[in-house]
Amino acid sequence: MSEKKNNWPLWEVFIRSRQGLGHRHVGSLHAADAEMAIGNARDVYTRRQEGVSIWVVPAEEITASSPDDSEALYDPANDKVYRHPTFFDLPDEVNHM
Amino acid sequence: MVVSQEQLTKQFNAYVADDKKIEPKDWMPDAYRKTLVRQISQHAHSEIIGMLPEGAWITRAPSLKRKAILLAKVQDEAGHGLYLYSACETLGVERDDLVADLLSGKAKYSSIFNYPSKTWADIGAIGWLVDGAAIMNQVPLCRCSYGPYARAMVRVCKEESFHQRQGYTIMMELMKGTKEQRDMAQDALNRWWWPSLMMFGPSDKDSKHSAQSMSWNIKRFSNDELRQRMVDMTVPQAELIGLKIPDPDLKWNEKKGGYDFGEINWDEFYEVIAGNGPCNEERLEARNKAHDDGEWVRKAAMAYAEKH
Ligand SMILES: [Fe+2]
Ligand SMILES: [Fe+2]
């Protein structure tokens, strides 16, 4: 019986769907190196012209925040309502603001 | 503050019941993770094995146009398999282990692909009925509570309607042809009709995973509900092109606004699941051969990557 594991690393794939938009995460794939990852990403994620540009990033190079930290990270923004324009009451006569 | 497992589970259940999404790093009950790994990997395996009955006809398609279309369709199915393996891996499993389970016969895949594709009309029937049933199953999964699975399903569903149309138009063309061609189409429908209805799984009263999956918002409709929809949608499509559904008990039921149909042969269903369908062995052999034949390529690519 042959060895079933190939251990090709995992790559995360990001695609710009058209000029003027940012790259967006679409999924992942396995490939031996970056060049093959780009080629595979083209075949897997852009068969119907879904993209004009591809980024591939080794999955292990990505550092992600933890859901457990979300309170510490995002709650402080909760009490800064003045960051939103609707916080400020303006007289009805003021236009274009 | 230490929160008990029980409390976490309670919070989780309330959260998903509220139709909110779970993402890979979020806490989830073990059983939820296991259910998803089982379902998503089986789904991925089905896409991959599903290429075999259709792939067999790529070289024998009746025209260059149909050959190109079928090639693109089968390539899409490979893509579906890959989207799904990718979604499954976000749950902390490894692709190679999933593939190994498929190759060893430990993992299951949709039983429908254990039936043979005997004639060109079978390619029509598969696209029309098998992809049709897959669409019926997959559309609700686009709203599944697990984010990566739902997103993979959105991609898959965008591609499926081409699959179904290419199948139906094969049947349409045959039904406009000679007597022999029409018989061939009817024969394909006769053989694929019941297995397609089996694709929705056991009837609700025997479905052991359904209730839990529904409460987790992984599943949105019961097997029998989806099967009924499939019948109601397909019967008029068959009639339109002059095909007869092979079910003497099929009858429009005005009161329920749907068709009544005959009993599915559940013995056959469980036999095929148990590995005794017409092509179970052949499928696994073909998949193992392809995997083994590709081994030197995978090794060479890795060796090259390590050098450069
Ligand atoms: Fe598919
Ligand atoms: Fe399909």
Image: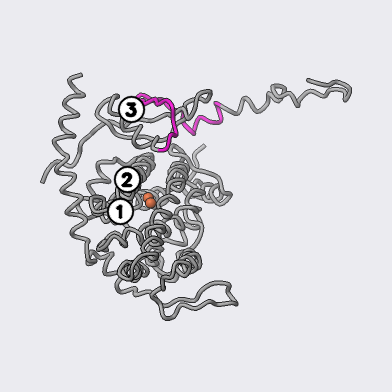
Q: CA distance from mark 3 to mark 1?
A: 26 Å
Which residue lies most toward the front here? B178
Q: Are marks 1 and 2 in contact (CB under 8 Å)?
A: no
Could you tell me if residue B173 is visible in this image? yes
Q: Position of residue B200 (x, y in %)?
A: 41, 63
Could you tell me if residue B34 is visible in this image? no
Residue A29 relative to residue B281: left or right? right
Q: Position of residue B141 (x, y in %)?
A: 47, 51
Q: CA distance from mark 1 to mark 2?
A: 18 Å
Residue occupying image coordinates x 25% and y 41%: B96
Residue at label 1? B50
Which residue lies most toward the left here? A1
Instruction: Specify the subunit that label 1 lies on.
Output: B
Q: Position of residue A46 (x, y in %)?
A: 40, 35
Q: Quadrant of the C terminus of chain B?
A: top left
The residue stretch that appears in magenta? A48-73
**Where, by quadrant of the figure, is residue A54 drawn?**
top left
Residue kind at label 1, given as amino acid type: Gly
Residue at label 2? B68
User: In the figure, A84 relative to B229: above or below?
Assistant: above
Residue kind at label 3, given as amino acid type: Ile
Q: Is mark 3 within 8 Å of ligand 1?
A: no
Check if residue B145 falls in the magenta segment: no
Residue at label 3? A38
Residue occupying image coordinates x 50% and y 24%: A19
Q: Is mark 1 within 8 Å of ligand 1?
A: yes
Check if residue A63 falls in the magenta segment: yes
